[in-house]
Amino acid sequence: MCIRAFSVKNGTMPRQIYQLRIALADVTPPVWRRVLVPGGYTLDRVHRVIQYAMGWQDLHLHSFDIGGQQYGEPDPVGELAVRDELDTRLDRVAGKGDGFRYTYDFGDWWEHEVTVEDVSGADPDTRYPVCVGGAQACPPEDVGGAYGYGELLAVLAEPGHPRREPMLAWLGRAYDPDEFDPDRATTLLRRLS
């Protein structure tokens, strides 16, 4: 768990910033992001940080698994036992060195390993959240999970592949799996601040 120090200057607790590394499981080459977020964010805001930083469109359900407890949007019919992510702050469930799982799209089953790499005081000149690193483009929505994404990469890598044109038509846009721009991700994250 995170230990907070009191500010000597004014006796108040400084705002804690969590450095999270978010890595998409089971894909090659690795797709990952490094973001700085306020520890006081509730898990619903952490969910949106992950969505914007990774490049997802928030079209599907999601959940967090932290310390064996499931967090997410409450199930209106009560079939899924999840704690309400709106009531749970990041700094109450994770600290430096902790890891947890975030799953997005229960059909494609995109699992993300999230690691709290560091916890530090906020820089007064920095606007949070911010994306400070990462690699590879996010897989397209509804591509079929890690297996479907692997197939897409194989098809795109072979110019004469018979499924290339249908795949490009399905994508409906240019897609470069090697492209990632942390500044663009940060621009999207500004929607949260």
Image (cartoon, helix red, strand yellow):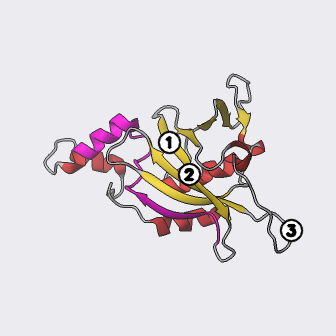
Q: Are marks 1 and 3 in contact (CB under 8 Å)?
A: no
Per the image, the residue denoted by label 2 is 50
Per the image, the residue denoted by label 3 is 11
Query: Would you call the spot at circle 1 few (<14 residues within 10 Å), some (14-19), or many (20 or more)?
Result: many
* Residue beneath the point at 17% across and 42% down: 162
Three-letter amino acid code at the position of disc 1: His
Q: Which residues are magenta?
A: 127-154
* Residue beneath the point at 70% across and 26% down: 81
Residue found at the far top of this picture? 79
Per the image, the residue denoted by label 1 is 112
Tally of numbered tags? 3
Q: Are marks 1 and 2 in contact (CB under 8 Å)?
A: yes
Tell which circle, 3 or 2, labels the residue nearer the N-terminal end: 3
Tell which circle, 1 or 2, labels the residue nearer the N-terminal end: 2
**In the picture shown, does residue 86 fall above or below 182?**
above
Which mark is nearer the camera, 1 or 3?
3
Q: What's the CA distance linking mark 3 and mark 2?
A: 33 Å
